Image: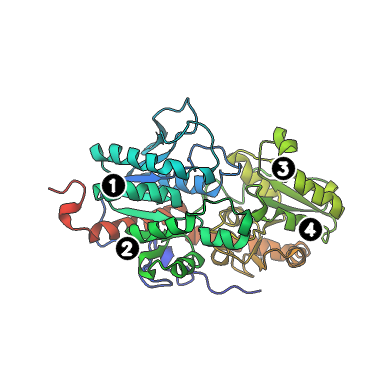
Amino acid sequence: MTSSPGPFDSGTFDSGTFAPGTFAPGTFGAAPVGPGALSIALVSEHASPLAALGGVDAGGQNVHVACLAGALADRGHRVTVYTRRDARDLPVETALRDGVRVHHVPAGPPEQIPKDELLPYMGEFGHYLARVWRDRPPDVVHSHFWMSGLASLRATRRLGLPLLHTYHALGTVKRRHQRLADPSPPQRIALETEVGFGCDRVIATCRDEVAELGRMGVPAAKAGIVPCGVDTELFTPCGPVAGRGTPRHQVLQLGRLVPRKGAAVSIAALALLPETELVVVGGPPAHRLEQDPEVRRLRALARRAGVAGRVRFTGGVPSADVPPLLRAADVVVCPADYEPFGIVPLEAMACGRPVVASAVGGQLDTVADPATGRLVPPGDPQALARAVAELLADPVTREASGAAGRRRVLRRYGWDRVAAATEAAYCEVLDALPVATRVGAV
């Protein structure tokens, strides 16, 4: 299966910015005026950049916000990330790194709450932002996820501040795939649409998202594309390699342990892949795996498929342990039912590993079939097994695909390039503001 050309095939992203109109209306070009040092507020209500990864509500968005904040700071900007206070012992502010602070917003009880239950606290969150920004207004606000957008919209409307928004996931897509199993609040889609109309610009992460926003009625001219990025110094082909089991081949799946990520599809495919071990990375810490309902479900599936002895669950692991695990794999699989963007394919490609991914969402843009791996229909264990088996049988192709993936990531997905494109989006919005309304205007 061959993918359509990716959004960066024209090479515009290689310059660090997006040329307008290259592949979607409203894509971001170089800012006509240099920004100087901006004060930037990133709002991420449930996904703290300080959170441990691998839990049900801690994954790609946490990584995205943390890395984007750091890359913007590297460009000379001052960044504050506003996230909900979810523990009593958290300070009001803490330094994440030079140029980046995390501000814990008191909205709702200071304890862990599933993100789908946070909507009642977004009014309080927005009121708090308005109070803080009245005295210390940022130059630009960039909200992440729909509830952050809702809270930020309330605050920026009061104060006349510019607002850009990244959805990370859309309720229309989630409801289409999960139907009655979707735990999102019933108002989600209507409120997401309100955020799309109310913000100054939407920063989408892939072409599929722009098309979905159009179906929601959000004007195409409001949306431009800046992809997620990957840390190309952490995720490299060279470095420690994790130990492997006794089977001849190893296939790895990495990410949150929720049904939509498709680990059940990987287990079913494993029954068609002899002499192969499946390593599933993510979920709760290893010592709590036995208590996790999804792990119990997947282990039962593995027993019924006759592959229980060839499936290994590591549990959640620290970020530093992920690259060695990726390097140990012959193939990395990403078989999600839907994937708003999908950072794991980038991390695997950065480590020089071929990827077999479902042909959905952002994976249509990032995985170049056949150069860096294969794209297969979602929910199809036979198709997944065939694509993996083809790569396992051909070490030369595996090596070439891994090398091509690394080159693709270096050209297109480094955080320095993503931050430059995001900065350009900020500057386009700021340059469009009347001078009298800009923060700091005389």
| Residue beneath disc 2 | 30
Colour pattern: rainbow
Q: Is residue 74 visible?
A: no
Q: Are marks 1 and 4 in contact (CB under 8 Å)?
A: no
Mark 2: which amino acid?
Ala
Where is residue 240 drawn, in percent x and y?
A: 65, 42
| Residue beneath disc 4 | 268
What whole-number distance in Å separates the C-alpha atoms at marks 2 and 4? Answer: 47 Å
Q: SS of the residue at dot 3?
A: helix
What whole-number distance in Å separates the C-alpha atoms at marks 3 and 2? Answer: 48 Å
Q: Are marks 4 and 3 in contact (CB under 8 Å)?
A: no
Q: Residues within 10 Å of mark 4 (few under 14, many from 20)?
A: many
| Residue at 78% over, 60% down | 269
Mark 1: which amino acid?
Leu
| Residue beneath disc 1 | 38
Give the label on residue 293, or none: 3
Mark 3: which amino acid?
Pro
Using the image as rendered, state which of residue 406 and residue 284 is in the foreground: 284
What whole-number distance in Å separates the C-alpha atoms at marks 1 and 4? Answer: 50 Å
What whole-number distance in Å separates the C-alpha atoms at marks 4 and 3? Answer: 18 Å
Q: SS of the residue at dot 1?
A: loop
Q: Earlier in the sequence, mark 1 or mark 4?
A: 1
Q: Earlier in the sequence, mark 1 or mark 3?
A: 1
